[in-house]
Image (cartoon, rainbow, N blue to C red):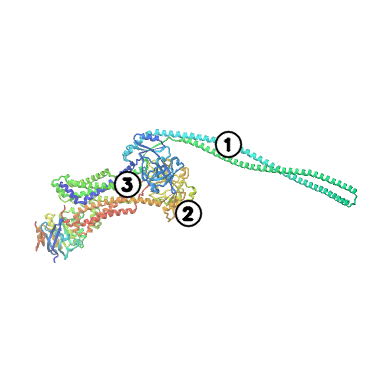
Amino acid sequence: MSYIELIDVVKEYSAKGGVTTRALDGINFHIEQGELVVIVGPSGAGKTTVLNMLGGMDTITSGEIWVDDVDISKFTPKQLTKYRRNDVGFVFQFYNLVPNFTALENVELSNQISKNPMSAKKIMHEVGLSHRLDNFPAQLSGGEQQRVSIARALAKNPKIMLCDEPTGALDYKTGKTILKLLQTMCRKKGMTVIIITHNQAIAPMADRVIQIKNGKVERMGINRNPLPVEEIEW
Amino acid sequence: MKIIHKDVLREIKVSTGRFVSLFLIVALGVAVYAGIRSSKPDMMISADAFYDESNLEDIRVMSTLGLTDEDVDALAKVDGIEKAVGTYTSDFICHLGDSQYVVKLMAITDGINEITLESGRMPQADNECLIDNYYMNLREYEIGDTIEIFSGDDTDPEDIVNVTEFTVTGSFVSSEYLSMTMGNTTIGSGKIEGLMAVKPSVFALDVYTEVDLLVDGAKELMCYSDEYEDLIDGEKDKIEEIREEREQARYDSVIGEANEELDKAKKEYDDGKAELDDAKKQYDDGKAELENAKNAYYNGINELDEKRAELTKGENDLAAAKTELANQKNALQAQKDSTYAEISQQQSTLDEQRAKLEAAHEAGLIPDAQYQAALEQIEAGQAQINAAKTQADTEFAAFDAKIAAGEQEIAANEQKIEDGKAAIADAEAQLYQAEIDIANGEKELEDAEKEIADGEKELKDAEKELDDAEREISKIEKAEWFILGRNYLTEYTSFKSDAERIGNIGKVFPMIFFIVAALVCLTTMTRMVDEERTQIGTLKALGYGKGMIMRKYIVYALLATLFGSVAGALAGGKIFPFVILNVYKILYPNIDKLYFPYNLEHSLVAAGASIVCILAATFFACTKSLLEQPAELMRPVAPKQAKKLLLERIPGLWSRIRFTWKNALRNFVRYKKRLFMTLFGIAGSTALLLVGFGLKDSINTILYSQFGSIDRYDEVVIIDGDATERNKEELSGVLENDARFGSFTYIYQSALDAESANTKEVMNVYLFVPEDMEALPDNVDLRDRVTQEKIPLENDSVLISEKMANQLKLKAGDTFQISSGQKDKKTLTVGGIVENYVYHYIYMSPVLYESLYGHQAEYNQILIKNSEGAHVDPSAFGEEFLKYDAVGGVMCVESLIEQFEDILSSLDSITLVLIVCAAGLTFVVLFNLNNINISERRRELATLKVLGFYDIELSQYIYRENVLITIIGVAIGVVFGIFLNRFVVTTVEVDIVMFGRQIFFPSFVKSILIAIGFAVIVNLIVHLKLKKIDMATSLKSVE
């Protein structure tokens, strides 16, 4: 069995008036440990729902989600929280830093609750923000904020890192440096990194590319020779 | 409907919480303002209705010399007087069981000062009466009971009333007396305990004691209002104009009458004197007669003695005569016997001789001659014997006759003596009678003497009386009229000041709510505008004007405010006056109908103030955003800069603080509006709770300080006014021998009026004079309230109770006056001010009393202390002791405590209202704070959830702020509450009582716990809300 495996995952939302929308319609894919994965697809294809399921933020209607030999789809809400707390690092499109905390404190926020954290300062150094430790988010640029966000995710030492459109709110150049950082971290730490994006252009940097369309996996491909970020253009 | 208006309705639907919190805080503010503010007019309206309904007099005229029908007519003719009615009142004493009470007897009048029948029927005959409802219930009278009234001083009740015994036909209330305080009097205990209403014909007075007046147009005005007071003052001035003339007329007529009576009395005196003179003359005559009788008596006695001697002599003579006669008789008999014996011997000798001769003759022995011769001889002898016999017979017959005559004489003499004896007996009887007569005469004379002496004394007294009367007539002062408005009625004014006190509270209390309401609105609307930046920007970009856009928010806030105002005014306008008036009804039980009309003025003011506050807040919130360019508005709001706190400069400290706390602390600095809103709300809520519990503590203080540590006695026995020394000794003996009682001491207590130059107020106070200064500290602890130091009672000054000192603005060294009904005025010096909570006291040493009044105080009460551990049942105590003649009444401190506990429980409703208000405040502000916090930080919270925060950790993240604000708010609230409580307590306390000033520890604990409890409830609800936050929110873009 692979490190992460989704088997026939179906997610239905029942709206008011009995109308049921099927967001995921039997998704099947698997990911190996240490891979940099890009999940790509157009808006409304079900990317975010996949991310929610993988991140333990929502329950599925049917199917199985295996992460490191555990079926998280059977988890209770409490177990899910624990899973998010210890095993998942999350990088948001809009960074979602706590405005009341300095950059360092935002990282500490996550490492204080996890089982096996890394030093916050060390991580900040690794993301290249040693000089911005005491700044509040409002005093940081978007790229810097996203780095703090990545640092916050990494600080937990998670099993998987989920990144939701990490470059969506950033300009091209900053976006590239963020992707570079993610690739570096993946390679250096051997961490499983999953990037969700609608930007097809990012796909070449991934070890594995999963294309989702209409709630189904349209295509899953393995990239034998992922390109370094510097070589990607969009 | 314009689309933008639709937006408002949808907005309300979507943000129900926000709308409701605005609605609630406005409703709360308006309810408290309108409610408490309305209480004052409602109290006055209720009183005014009662006054008008019963035609309570507007003006009362009294005169030192009474008022006549002419006075009434003159008053009725004064311009503006609707009605003038002369009537009577007089104070009497009535007995109930073994106690005596002072009652005010009043004539039932028609069309003015009408009484309200509470039970039974109106009196139809002179010997029927009504008694006031309170007194009836208190003393457990029943319809059909009889009440006899007695004079309280030396006047004869018959001079005042025609009937002194009445049958109770029912009970009544009078608008003159709203409560159980009926005022003071000069008789009995000095305190009027009840009212009796009778037909006017019961009164025998020839002048009215007062004339009650109704003023034209006064009824239409609210009593207590300035318009009313002005009208009455104007009318009083008009009465002033006829005053002098009427006073003079009354004086003249009184003087005339008095002189007339004096002349009559003088004549009577003269007659009496003449009568006495006659009596004296008669006495003298009688005395002379008696002397004569006495002389005659003594003469009679002498005469009698003489007669008795004579009689004795006669008797002796008679006895001698009798003896002589008997001797004579015996001698005569003997002579007679010897003579006749001799004769008969001679005869016998002759007869022998004759026989011998005859025999010899016969025998012939003797010649015839011889014989013859012898015979002749014998014959001659015979003749001789016969002659002797005859001679003897004659002789003896003479003798016999002589003796018979002697005997006759003796018999006659004997008869004479008998007669003499009878005469003496008669004389003796006569003398005896005379003796008795004399004795009677003497006694009569003695009585007459005494009578004359009495008569002389009476005459002398009469003379003195005449002199006095003359002097008194010369002393009769000009009649003086007292023209009094309703302010003269104690109850009328005390009710007014109570209403004003509530009015004062209404000035301060609602401020808390308005400040909080404004803050809540400011923060809420600011947040609302912030949330809708994008929409505002879009609308602006679409070409909507500022006013148009702002209208949504204005309308939104206005709707909340309007609904809130209406709801608050409707609920508060009834609930607060209802609770407050019902609490006051305990103090003024006679007002039977309470009115709670909606008070438009206060509701509008409250609503207006809310609207202004909230519109200003909304406008303030909107303008900032609306001034920005649409493009800026489309972009997310630049987050408010977080700042480093001073706290962080302390090395090593910040890194040790948990991030949840860090967040809370930074938020504090970041959102000051919210901080103040919440702090204010929670502080206000705590303060309200503290006021509620503190109010009860204040009364508890009365209980435990007054009846526990100040008044140390357990029972009071009031000495009956008629008790004799022996009665009192009996009572003392009983008390001494009863093991339940440890000690007892006599005191003098009497109700008085006190006034000082510092204020206009006249206060009813008690003068307290201990008999034994040594025993005083055991019974009453005279001490300073703050330092608890004992204050000694000196002989040159008095101690007064604290509230009295405050009311009359007196401090140690000041002087003030006491009097009873303006009589007997004395000036006293304040030696010190002592802690006291119930009634007002002047403590005076017996030495000072005596030097002031010229006589010893008549100790009229006994303070009794129970033995250690002994318990005396109050009702049994009364029953037991009222038996004694010396006892006029009893009182147990234990039953007083029970009465106060009743008042205490009545305050529960106020405490409850305060708790509800406090809860409302806490809920509104904390909900609001949390609502804003959650909606503003929804994204942040969702992120934290994604990061793997447990529910409880997430709640704590928000709670830290709540907890911190709650703690600080409660701390501020405690301080604020202490001041607010002080204000409320001093404002609401009634005249006769001083409430305690401190709040007890448990009340702090309770207030704090309840305030925190409210916060906890809000936090629990917040917890549920947080659980519902969707993590997907974290993925959405910033709006």
Viewer-nearest of labels 1 and 3? 1
Disc 1 to disc 3: CB gap under 8 Å: no
| Depth order, front residue of B253/B657 | B253
Q: Which residue is mark 3?
A: B581
Q: Is residue A230 left or right of residue B349?
A: left
Residue assigned mark 1: B282
Of label 1 and label 3, which has the lower sequence position? 1
Both marks 2 and 3 on one chain: yes
Subunit bearing disc 1: B
* Residue A97 or residue B184, whichever sits in front: B184
**Disc 2 marks which residue?**
B737
Q: Position of residue A44 (x, y in %)?
A: 12, 57
Rounded to the nearest whole Å, what is the CA distance between mark 2 and mark 3? 49 Å
> Badge 1, how many Cα within 10 Å: few under 14, some, many 20+?
some
Q: Are marks 2 and 3 in contact (CB under 8 Å)?
A: no
Asked which secondary structure carries label 3, the reply is: helix
x then y, percent, for residue B478? 43, 35
- Give the amino acid at mark 2: Asn
Q: Is residue B683 above or below residue B444?
A: below
Q: Is residue B944 visible?
A: yes
Q: Is residue B306 above or below residue B866?
A: above
Disc 2: CA contacts within 10 A as few (<14), some (14-19) or many (>=20):
few
Which of B792 and B209 lies nearest the eye of the viewer?
A: B209
